[in-house]
Image (spheres, coloured by chain):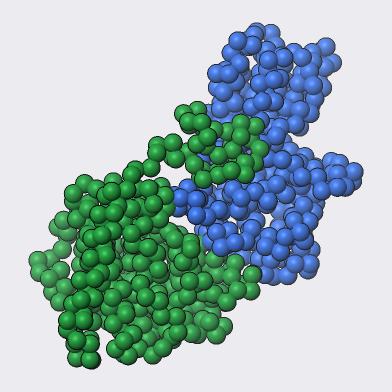
Amino acid sequence: MTEMTFADAVREGLAEEMRRDPLVWALGEDLSTAHGGTSANQYTGLIDEFGPKRIVNTPISENTIMGAAVGAAVAGTRPVADLRMADFGMCAVDELVNQAAKIRYMFGGQARVPLVVRQAIGVRKGAAAQHSQSTEAWYVHTPGLVVVAPGTPADGRGLLKSAIRADDPVVFMEHKDLWVATGDVPDDEGVVPIGVAKTVRTGNDLTLVSWSKMARLCEEVAETLAGDGVSVEVIDLRSLWPWDTAAVYASVRKTGRLLVAQEAVQTGGFAAEVATDVTEHCFDALKTHVRRIGAPRMPVPYAEPMENEYRVTPERILARARETLAA
Amino acid sequence: MSKITEPVRTNEPARVFELFKTMCLIRAFEERAEDAFDAGFVNGSIHQYIGEEAIGTGVCANLRDSDYILSNHRGHGHSIAKGANPEAMMKELMGRVGGTSGAKGGSMHIADFSVGMLGANGVLADGLTMGVGAAQAISLKGEDAIVTVFVGDGTTNRGPFYEALNWAMVYALPIMFVCENNSYASSTMTRSVTAGEGPVARAKAFGMPAFDVDGNDVSAVDTLAADLIGRIRGGGGPQFLHARTYRVKGHISRDKMLYRAEGETEEHWKDEPIGRCAAWLATNGIAEDEVNAARDAAYARIDAAVAEAKEAPFPDASLAYADVQDYGPPEPWAQDGSQDGPQDGSQSGSTS
């Protein structure tokens, strides 16, 4: 194991895949400048090793970053398109949803679209309404796409590898706050399979399901509740489509109580899908109705007191968890 | 569709006669497709290429199977010219087993990857952005191939058109953009919603070599395409071919064209490319009965394709679940074995 940041781990994962397969390449804005990915150095140094044909520094042209990735994928390569933030990803929803997600299907299986599109999610302090959104549910809703949202450096590296090797288009959503978070990363290949959750803490009284940065907050909440003598099982889904129903069902059948926590706006979010699905499949095992927690249905505000009002904090998750436990 | 892969100079009667045959095949396909639509055999609408056949024909005659084209909603002609099978295309229109896209796409989503036809498209301008990506793949793999993207005049008002032209120049990609200017963007006269001097000027603004041609003169298109494609194969970078034509049909076949002036269509019909080409052949040594026989053969082939398609079965409804994606559990309604991927969400090897 080696301790490293999420950004470094994912960069290593990309470099390892590019060494393994000469058809893997990356494109996006600012990839080959001194800091290689202005947000968190996710591409620093890669241009030196792989050159400008495989680390392609693009104009600010989201339609074409995404569209070119689709065209290059159907033409036999494995592009990793970086749209920097999920908010900018909206500029390329057409190419992702109308093209990447549908080409295999609407052409009767003649082509695959093996691409990865990186879109960072989550509230970044002071970034306000257009640099802080979590849009994972949009893409889970779109047939043809795979959606992953890793929450640790090891999962970031391992899921990027699986995403690159997949023949489906994969939306890879990394939380901006996680880029600088550190964690142990295995020294071996460390591939993390798509669609497999990780039970990061076992317990018997409550199942807490989450993903991305929220899964880390859920671990804090579980620790707090342990002090009260409550045993909480925390599941980090890691993949949202497909998601690991088997792991969640098994846990709920053990604990009888489920709270799903997400950072995105609660209404119409992925937690609603998990809650409904578990209710449909595990109703007999539930001691109380499934609960969820997400952000209020409003744009992300700027000033700190309002920004904090928007956030799904450990305190808020804790309160909802206690409510679930008491019911 | 006869393939002429060497960029021979045109105005050689035998070559022009081959182009004529391809144009006739496209025309016959489009006319019979409309008949089939009117008779209720086509589940969706069709966008016909009638009167524009010379462009796709003249361009694709200079392409190889290993070259890629990306088309748009009006893609039947491009597909046939690139070598797609009209019999399979007719089945696709009628939603039958054996259709080019397995009856999953219909008229607007015809593709034949076996001949480098990477797809018609229901969203305008997306062929441009995907086209530059395909060209980047060619460049990365070091292949000897080029990409051609067909767009209409209306598409030159979408943002991705500019992104893609800029991108193609920045990376000096092996790509040709063919703008088929048929004057109409759906039911709107394009010039009534377009500023500036038009597509050629817009392409030149990016430093891209851009040329204008009479798009109803198949020899002229062939000659210019041969020249531009030769430049691209020689490492000359992106080229822009602007072909003037006219959409004699409606936006879709059932469009009554109430937005047109009286006599406008009839006036333009006098200039349609197949009649012009036939007249040229008649004065350049191809006997009239040979020309008529070629035209009749095209219609006979398409008539047979229509009959074959009508006889073909519809796909089983359970095939709707195939080819969605590798990952993910079966849909609740899916019948056994009809959906990709095992329940546990791990990757499935068995698809389609």
- Residue B232 can be seen, yes or no: yes
Residue A260 sits in which quadrant? top right
- Quadrant containing the C terminus of chain A is top right
Task: Name the residue: 70% across, 34% down.
Answer: A196
> Residue B8 at what x, y percent from top left?
41, 88
Give the chain ID for the blue colour: A
Task: Name the residue: 22% across, 73% down.
Answer: B295
Q: Residue furthest right?
A: A1
Chain B's colour is: green
Residue B190 sits in which quadrant? bottom left
Looking at the rendered structure, the number of numbered marks drawn on it comes to 0
> Residue A131 at what x, y percent from top left?
61, 46
Task: Name the residue: 54% across, 66% down.
Answer: B134
Task: Name the residue: 61% across, 31% down.
Answer: B343
- Quadrant containing the N terminus of chain A is top right
> Residue B128 at what x, y percent from top left?
46, 65
> Residue B303 at what x, y percent from top left?
23, 60
Q: Is residue A92 left or right of residue B347?
A: left
Looking at the picture, does residue B327 appear above or below residue B177? Answer: above
Looking at the picture, does residue B271 appear above or below residue A33? Answer: below
Could you say which is closer to the camera, residue A195 or residue B316? B316
Looking at the picture, does residue B250 appear above or below residue A122? Answer: below
Q: Is residue B36 left or right of residue A102?
A: left
- Residue B179 can be seen, yes or no: no
Looking at the picture, does residue B337 appear above or below residue A232? Answer: below
